[in-house]
Amino acid sequence: MNIADQIYSAADSANQDRAQAIRDNLRDAIVDRRLAPGTKLSEGEVGTLFDVSRTVARAALQMLSFEGLVRTERNRGAFVANPSPEEARQVFASRRLIEPGIAIAACGRVTAADVAAFRAQLDEEGRFIAERGPTARRSEIKASGDFHLLLASVAGNAILQRFMEELVARSSLVIALYGRSGVSACGHSEHTEIVGALERSDSGLASRLMLHHIDHIEADLDLRVRAGPALREALNF
Amino acid sequence: MNIADQIYSAADSANQDRAQAIRDNLRDAIVDRRLAPGTKLSEGEVGTLFDVSRTVARAALQMLSFEGLVRTERNRGAFVANPSPEEARQVFASRRLIEPGIAIAACGRVTAADVAAFRAQLDEEGRFIAERGPTARRSEIKASGDFHLLLASVAGNAILQRFMEELVARSSLVIALYGRSGVSACGHSEHTEIVGALERSDSGLASRLMLHHIDHIEADLDLRVRAGPALREALNF
DNA sequence: TGCACAAGAATCGTATGCAATCTTTTTTAG
DNA sequence: CTAAAAAAGATTGCATACGATTCTTGTGCA
């Protein structure tokens, strides 16, 4: 199911739409924080950058705005989203509601191949944690999100999978914005525990571990409103 | 102030985005089953129908495709979605995961004004149930969905609210396709009970009632694969 | 009659142009 | 010198144009 999924989605993105490819590119850039929140994404600029017309660039930006990664204002353009603390709370409240259920569903469907994929994923996470520097930290956030996406794909519900894609992407943005420290090592060990529960098909444990894991991630955020960002926001920076 | 002015200002107030207005219109039509599943939605036709260019019509169709109400195939066009039984199951699995949590959240935030809104909503549902005929049945399905959307708005999480909008819309489609009978009266009484639980802020009860309610809705569906729809699907009808 | 195939029509994907709106800079009055 | 007004420049919203792809229909051949 994993390999088939990968092939399918690869063929899909190659074949289907250039707008989709651009969206994926931009999404990665936003999630990796190469594009800072608030950055203006002009249609023309995106178009020339990817060598397409404004029409296609616009479609890509529209998709991102649906996912909540980009905020569009009429006659003003598109900007990388700058989630408020309240939005951040809602993102995590949503995850608390959905992900334990996903963990339970995954327990009932996980295969040996899936477990192998999880192990590979965990290894990759570990590598990024061992490294130092901002680039490694970005990759680490991304890898951590990919773990949750992998779990969602194993759960076998396409709708929830799409919801999770959105929530994970927005979480990455929130963590990059409000993250306090590197609780990542802790997150990594929790991921490992969750895989262990999956392997033993202990759905109750997997669900509980997931809930705690999300709590820990959110607890590492500093969601107090700060003067700096608010001022910037007010000045349209 | 003449007629032309009124028309202009009306168009202006609906200004926000013409594509959005068209999307809402089409969504209502799909949810109400005025547009049958599988119906082709050509960009040109939609455009002339709403008196806009293909560009705008295309944007509206893209939005609907994100919501899963429309399926687009490259170089072939957009069609009203024809959810498979498997998709239907996933829709309800998602709702089982999300809506009990929404009911709990709503319990903690419901105001007197909200309760009044719920009562009005229940009254409207009752009216449609009392009536007979296909038009009333459509309105009834829509009103039933609106109850769940109202609950989601009371819960106060914008992200979950959007997820619910999508799930309710897709549910309406599924019910119209696979619905067996009029379990609606039962559904109505269950809605009433849920509002009662809300009023008493009994979150545990509200959550349990919601879960049973979703189970009942799904139990009324006939999700066996039938030759008819499969054939139609194969013939691209 | 039935089937393969090709010309034509319809539709989609994308680029580009123009008007409306927003932003920035320059000008001008106090 | 400051602040408001106006003009210039940039960017978006939308419509339209054109090549590419798919669907339809009619024709020839077995």
Image (cartoon, coloured by chain):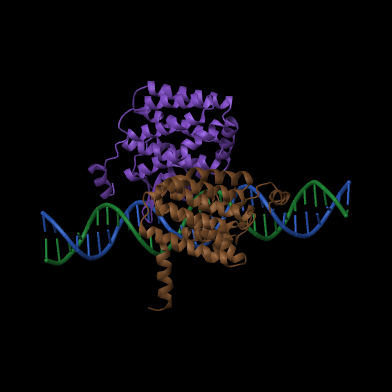
Chain colours: A purple, B brown, C green, D blue
Q: Is residue B174 left or right of residue A150?
A: right
Q: Nearer the viewer, residue C28 or D26?
A: D26
Quadrant assignment for the C terminus of chain B: bottom right
Considering every residue shown, the one lying at the far bottom of the view is B2
- Residue shown at 38% from the left, 44% from the top: A90
Which residue is found at the position 57% from the left and 58% from the top?
B184
Residue A109, given in percent of the width and then of the height, sits at 58, 32
Location of residue A82 with respect to B145 vertically, above or below: above
Residue nearest the observer in this picture, A210 or B29: A210
| Quadrant assignment for the N terminus of chain B | bottom left
Q: Nearer the viewer, residue B233 or A189?
A: A189
Q: Is residue A174 left or right of residue A108?
A: left
Residue A53 shows up from this direction:
no
What's the residue at 48%, 64% (across, down)? B123
Residue A162 seen anywhere in this rendered image of the structure = yes
Residue C13 x, y percent position in the rendering: 56, 49
Q: Position of residue A28 (x, y in %)?
A: 43, 36
- Number of marks in the image? 0
> How far from the left and from the top, in percent, is residue B195?
45, 55
